[in-house]
Image (cartoon, helix red, strand yellow):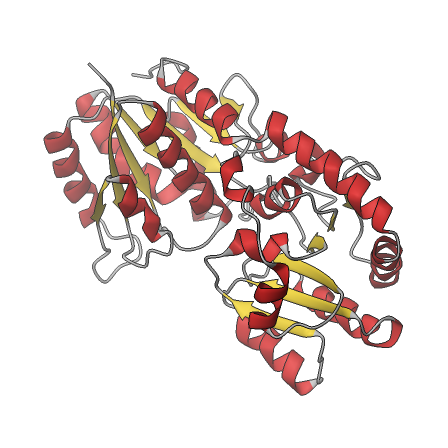
Amino acid sequence: MNKKILFFVDTLRSGGMERRFVELLHYLKNKTGYEIQVIVLSDDIHYDYIYDLGIEVKILKRILLKKDPSIFFRFLKIVKKFKPDIIHTWSIMTTIYCIPSKIIFQLPLIASLISNAKKEFGRWSLKNLFFQICCYYSDIILANSYSGLIEYGLNELNGKVIYNGVRLERFHNNFNKTKILNEIGIKTSVVVIMVASFLKSKNYDLFLNVAKEFENINKDVAFVAVGDGEKFQSIKYRVQNENITNVHLLGKQQNIEELVAVSDIGVLFTYSEGISNSIIEYMALGKPVITTDSYGGSKEIIKNGKNGYIMDNNLDEIVKKLNELIENKALQDSLGEEGKQLIKTKFSLERMGREFLDIYKYGYKLKG
């Protein structure tokens, strides 16, 4: 009899973790006979093609409180009815909510807790206490980078790294560059794209500063930003107030593949990442990459000068390197091809899916 897996996530808004999760669901539905149910704490679902997979999605909305204690009991009822073989959570709070169910029903609890490479809470914080509780009760902790595993004080005895994977068929379409750029209103020969949420961890101010420099260096370059988030309005204000004419803020978009495909260079100005889906998607489409993630997991995918560049958040140096790339098409093609080959071998959905299946098939030691 096939396994039943109960997934529990905070949200299905646009984001790297959410993209990774939905890609995994796609793999499981198409490659296995597993019975799957998904529980979400929010009804704000951006990856709505999850419904096309024929997976049952239940919304457990919080009532008044962000840390709503009623979730414990409502989740317990779902577990009792669904009778899963495995619970797989994707955040600290969803893991906390699962612990009573794990104990009562003696179920394996797999927790994908680490998707960045810089701990965002202090040693004496409530969140760190919750994280330690999750580690104690989870049968295995999953990270998407070795940098993240180390940052959170874990090793391969109590944690495991599974790199992000993407469906390579998403990138095989022949995109009409002229048509797509006309729809956006771009008439330049060169397009630089950054796909990232507008959060404090992403350096969109640097993105604007680089664009401003190119207004003086090369007016034939457009800078495209794709995403939304808490800093979107402040960045939009800067663009308008400073009259930065070569920047296009597209907001949240579903057609990420075609936007990257018609761009020439992908950038990710950030303070720390795990393994970035944006970088993977840039490379899958043969684009050279520049990132400022010198602290996190980007060094596990980018080899400096071979398939991209990892740089400090230094405006002058980034402008110089970006201009060098723009003026050297052969270098763009060389870096892009190296990146594309790496994604095929190391970051495919098939590889990621198989590694998750290995975990589900007793790749953990049940506690309790």
Which one is in front, 153 or 248? 248
Q: In this rendering, does residue 341 appear at all?
A: yes
Residue 37 image point, x, y percent: 23, 36
Q: x%, y% of residue 169?
A: 50, 38
Does the image show residue 231? no
Q: In the image, residue 65 lies at what x, y percent?
A: 26, 59
| Residue 206 image offset from top left, x and y in percent | 73, 65
Residue 259 lies left or right of residue 110; in this view the side is right
In the rendered view, tell whether residue 142 sits above or below residue 244.
above
In which quadrant is the N terminus drawn?
Answer: top left
Give whichever of 358, 274 is nearer the camera: 358
Task: Residue 195: name its quadrant.
Answer: bottom right
Q: Is residue 288 left or right of residue 281?
A: right
Q: What number of labels is visible?
A: 0
**Which of the 4 quarters of the picture holds residue 111?**
top left
| Residue situated in front as seen by the camera: 48 or 88 | 48
Residue at 21% in and 50% down: 60
Residue ID at (45%, 27%): 141
Answer above or below: position of 29 versus 266.
above
> Relative to 333, is 100 above or below?
above
User: What residue appears at the point 22 percent right and 20 percent down from the top-left corner?
Assistant: 106
**The C terminus - image quarter:** top left
